[in-house]
Image: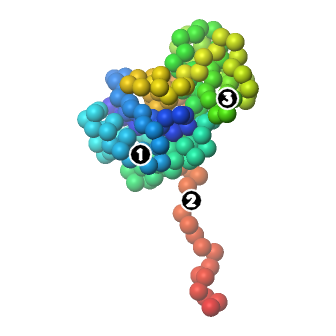
């Protein structure tokens, strides 16, 4: 059985989720991710009755969205991956939003860019496969017929329909949408020379 942990802080609220191969997802949301991410992770793991040592893979939302939030989630995901010796990869927030859309055929998914602007991506659902169709756009207005999946935050209260849950669905069903192996970019600090040699 493969157990996955997902992290997101790109949206108005941060979210964390845990899933297994049986499709069970336990997730939660919290405000102010920088201060509260560790508590959220502990709470979700406890509700799922899973320990950190049970985690096989970590998936992190890499945006678009809040730059500070994305950095928080990526650093947390990389730190956990390094500590646990597990793989970590990234998923786009628009992909996670598209997972929740019930639309068939071609449709658009949108997430908040702040300041009443939107990141918009076009998709096509072909059977069980979800495909990106174009380059993401930054729009001043939502396209007609498009509803954002993760906004506003009050609509998400007590809901499993959050970005971390969408990320887990991608990791289980749509591996082709996973964008980046982030841990490959982590490098240990290697000074070129001893700073004290010339002093």
| Structure colour scheme | rainbow
Could you tell me which quadrant the N terminus lies in?
top left
Residue 102 lies, in percent from the top left, at: 53, 11
List the residue tagged with mark 2. 187
> With respect to residue 1, does 197 lie above or below?
below
Horizontally, residue 59 falls left or right of residue 98, namely left
Sequence-wise, the earlier of marks 1 and 3 is 1
List the residue tagged with mark 1. 36
* CA separation in Å, label 1 and label 3: 26 Å
Other-residue count near label 1 (Cα within 10 Å), few / some / many at <14 / 14–19 / ≥20: few
Based on the displayed image, in which of its 4 quarters is residue 58 positioned?
top left
Residue 83 lies, in percent from the top left, at: 40, 54
Q: Residue at x 42, y 44 (%)?
A: 37
Q: Which mark is residue 136?
A: none
Tag 1–tag 3 contact (CB < 8 Å): no
Q: Nearer the viewer, mark 3 or mark 2?
A: 3
Q: Which mark is residue 116?
A: 3
Q: Does the image show residue 85?
A: no
* CA separation in Å, label 2 and label 1: 27 Å
Sequence-wise, the earlier of marks 3 and 2 is 3
> With respect to residue 185, does 188 lie above or below?
below
């Amino acid at each position: 059985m493969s157990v996955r942990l997902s992290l997101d802080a790109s949206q108005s609220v941060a979210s964390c989720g845990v899933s297994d191969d049986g499709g069970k997802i336990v997730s939660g949301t919290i405000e102010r991710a920088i201060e509260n991410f560790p508590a959220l992770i502990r709470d979700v793991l406890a509700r799922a009755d899973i320990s950190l040592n049970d985690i096989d893979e970590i998936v992190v939302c890499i945006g678009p969205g809040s730059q500070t939030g994305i950095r928080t989630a990526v650093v947390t995901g990389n730190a956990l991956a390094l500590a646990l010796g597990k793989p970590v990869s990234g998923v786009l927030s628009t992909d996670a939003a598209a997972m929740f859309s019930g639309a068939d055929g071609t449709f658009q998914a949108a997430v908040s860019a702040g300041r009443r602007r939107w990141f918009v991506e076009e998709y096509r659902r072909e059977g069980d496969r979800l495909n990106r169709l174009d380059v993401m756009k930054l729009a001043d207005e939502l396209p007609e017929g498009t509803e954002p999946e993760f906004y506003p935050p009050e609509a998400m209260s007590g809901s499993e329909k959050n970005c971390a849950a969408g990320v887990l669905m991608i990791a289980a069903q749509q591996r082709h949408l996973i964008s980046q192996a982030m841990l490959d970019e982590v490098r240990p600090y290697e000074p070129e020379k001893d700073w004290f040699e010339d002093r």
